[in-house]
Amino acid sequence: MMRGRSLGVNCLALGEVQIKYAKIGPARQGPFLPKRAGVLSVNSFIIMSVKLTLGDKEYFPGIAPISYEGPDSDNPLAFKYYNPDQLVAGKSMRDHLRFAVAYWHSFCGTGGDPFGPGTKLFPWNGHPDPVQAAKHKMDAAFEFITKLGAGFYCFHDVDVVDEGPTVAETERRT
């Protein structure tokens, strides 16, 4: 059952994964991956092409899908030189430049470093239930990926839902 609304772009809802995967190394089923979703882990790193769906809450309101407007555009949220449909050497720019959003770097990391804790506060991290918090994070991520027009995303095994205090709890969450 798909939840939320669609921008008319390829969409995904948690638990209803439609995946095309690129096998870039020896494949294994990771212990923290939702086996029921058919996710293929590639050396603990996953590359996916997905169909995206926006969740019930919009995390980036007022931001329309980013599109090509040309080098003279004064819109800071427009592509100036990347035109996904433009042919270069007989192939579209979309096919030459297969952009992916790194899930952990964009939606999990809070900016902590050896000098102190993270300072990035994400609105999708507030729920006390880790599985529901993961669903909120996915809603935000796939809204962002959809609006950016990236055809792929990548993540490590436990980026989807936070690790539990024990291996058993972590596996229960996934």
Image (tube, rainbow, N blue to C red):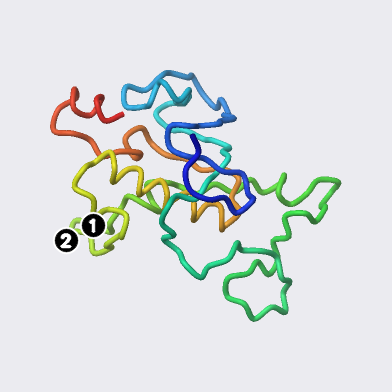
Under mark 2, the amino acid is Gly
**For numbered disc 1, what is the local secondary structure?**
loop
State whether residue 131 is above or below residue 140.
Answer: above
- What is the CA distance from the residue labelled 2 to the residue labelled 1? 6 Å
Q: Is residue 74 left or right of residue 154?
A: right
Q: Residue furthest right?
A: 90
Residue under numbered circle 2 = 116
x and y, in percent, of residue 57 in the image: 41, 56
x and y, in percent, of residue 61 in the image: 47, 67
Q: Is residue 23 left or right of residue 94?
A: left
**For numbered disc 2, what is the local secondary structure?**
loop
Question: Image quadrant of residue 30?
Answer: top left
Q: Quick one: 121 or 140, which is closer to the camera?
A: 140
Under mark 1, the amino acid is Gly
Residue under numbered circle 1 = 112
Please report contact status of discs 2 and 1: CB closer than 8 Å, yes or no.
yes
State whether residue 24 is above or below residue 142.
Answer: above
State whether residue 112 is above or below residue 171.
Answer: below
